[in-house]
Amino acid sequence: MKLINGKEISKSIKDEIKAEVEALKAAGKRLPKLVVVLVGDNQASQVYVRNKERGCQYTGMLSEIIRRDNNCTQEELLKIIDDLNHDDHVDGILVQLPLPKQIDEQAIIEAIDPTKDVDGFHPRNIAKLFLNEEGLVPCTPAGMMAMLDAIGYDLDGKEVCVVGRSNIVGKPVSLLALARNATVTIAHSHTKDLPKVTSRADVLIAAIGQPKFFTKEYIKEGAVVLDVGMDRDENNKLCGDVDFEDVKDKCHAITPVPGGVGPMTIALLLKNTMKAYKMRG
């Protein structure tokens, strides 16, 4: 069994970006800048934003965090986004989700300039993904493809099963796998006889948000397992959607939780920011 180490792979991506930023600095050029907008006091969101800030600091990119409290209105947030859209020194805009209930998340996502939408959630970027055109790709799915590249795993002709159909992970990762000539099945809560479906797959992508749900009867012998879950088990210990100890000996390769897909999301966000910077010239 091969452990797919997201910390190591993400560090190599960040090191590449760091070298690019240093070259820009040496040439006296403007540096890429990411702005993160954080509304409210969600603890998990605070942690994610801190990690994004650390990633920027590591690579030498410029970053700024705009904080607003839980009472922030949709109008206020739209005004912030509009200002950032028109700021030529800002390359990437990320509004940390979830947002307080008085704010329409989709309206906010659609207000971001698609060329600065480093989360890759804007309908225009999703359309580009659908059409297999160059755009900004959602970070977690792109991170999973980078993991497969890092272990030299070719999806051509392979069966991929994605369990979970979210707009953030399940649907986009299915399109990325399809673009690499995989045969893709999307399973979800209404899928009949789930173990029968998943145990056919050469690659299982688990993204349902249920701790240790996938045990060895769900896994094909020699499969690659990518675990997107970030859950807590009965002892309040961080775990994934896959029961790691139960399935590991059956896998060709598997991502751990923590230290698997999570760090890749940050690395690909930074890569998207650099890409947005280059696209904007």
Image: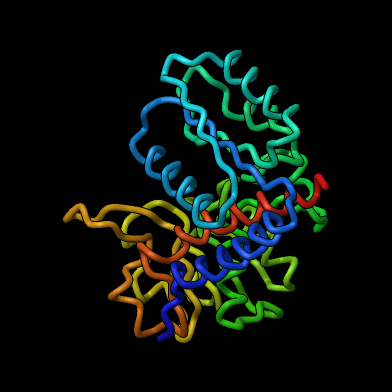
Q: Residue at x 47, y 86 (%)?
A: 222
The spot of residue 184 in percent (x, y) is 65, 67
22 and 154: which one is in front? 22
Residue 259: image x %, image y %?
39, 65
Whether 8 is drawn above or below 274: the answer is below
Q: Farthest left residue?
A: 235
Observer-nearest residue: 187 or 257? 257
Which quarter of the picture shows residue 146? bottom right
Q: Is residue 157 left or right of 224 when viewed as pictured?
A: right
Residue 77, image x and y in percent?
A: 58, 20
Against 104, residue 186 (above or below) is: below
Q: Position of residue 127 (x, y in %)?
A: 78, 46
Q: Residue at coordinates 39% horizontally, 84% vertically from top-left?
A: 250
Q: Is residue 214 visible?
A: yes
Q: Is residue 94 left or right of residue 217?
A: right
User: In front here: 163 or 240?
Assistant: 240
The residue under the point 71% across, 40% down is 116
Q: How many marks?
A: 0
Q: Residue at x 80, y 58 (%)?
A: 132
